[in-house]
Amino acid sequence: MQLVGRVADVLAAEALEVVTIPLRARECDAASSEALLEEYAETRDPALRDQILEVYLPLSYHLAQRFRNRGEPLEDLAQVAALAMVKAIDRFDPARGVRFSTFAVPTVVGELKRHFRDRMWAVRVPRRLKDLRVTMAAEISELGQLLGRSPTVPEIAERLGLSEEEVLEVVEAGAAFRAESLTPAPDGGDEAPDNGWAAAALAVRDQHTDLVDDHDELRRLLDVLAERERLIVYLRFFQGMTQSEIAAAVGVSQMHVSRLLQRSLLRLREAARASEDDE
């Protein structure tokens, strides 16, 4: 944890410097660090690692800048790159005869790509679909240049050796990469300013919401009626059938249906009053 804190402090100090000083100006430091790397490989002295890290932090920041404007703050990317540089220092073997920068660059870039692949998804998506999404994006771009237009789903499927269903599945999974905000972001925010339509749509009051409690109460009150009376009330007020239609369906006269409805409504009113009194 002490090392991570030191990384953050040093990175903050180097952030402005790396913008104005070309990486070539630090080649002398990189050359001298090769000797430190050899010594660190033998001793594993944390103080040596800190010295080496200070030399190569500008390189990690430079690599993090390649991934800016992809929905993740540059400060977070720089932190990921710095920690990846620490891993590269720990894993580097000078005996292989490879320059450290040659080893460190793919290590840091790989960690940055892994960060986007594993941490930036709004919804958990299978690893296979994540990898296919990256591959498909590159192939679609290349196909678009060859064809002079956007490729179709069958063309993409043939290019990748997938079925059309698999291509569509990857496209749908890509929608889970980043969730849209339900509220508009303040000025200068990362979210698009017109995203507030989602919140407005979800905030519209459903005119039937107030009827939910009434329906629950009515279902309870209907239990006081006999089965045939309950059926008649249901057909009349829930299905919208006329008294003549109900009479034909139940097998009684229309006059009898009318009397049963009047009696049923009277019993329902009495049951509702009794329920109010109990409350």
Image (cartoon, helix red, strand yellow):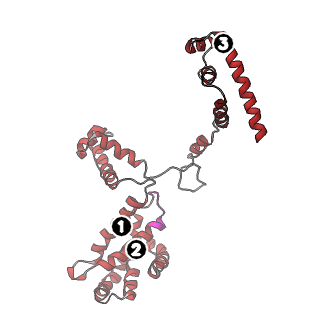
Can residue 147 be seen here? The reply is no
Q: Tell me which amino acid carries mark 1.
A: Glu
Q: Quadrant of residue 150?
A: top left
Closer-to-camera residue (222/141): 222
> Is residue 71 located in the magenta-colored stretch of the structure?
yes
Q: Quadrant of the C terminus?
A: top right
The residue carrying mark 1 is: 111
- Secondary-structure class at tag 2: helix
The residue carrying mark 2 is: 83
Asked whether the residues under the numbered discs 3 and 1 touch, taking CB atoms below 8 Å apart as contact, a structural biologist would say no
Closer-to-camera residue (106/167): 167
Q: Tell me which amino acid carries mark 2.
A: Leu
| Disc assigned to residue 256 | 3
Q: Quadrant of residue 49?
A: bottom left
The CA span between labels 2 and 1 is: 9 Å
| Lower position in the chain sequence, tag 3 or tag 1 | 1
Q: Residue 180, relative to residue 83: is it above or below?
A: above
Which segment did they paint magenta?
69-76
- What residue appears at the point 44 percent right and 53 percent down from the top-left corner? 123
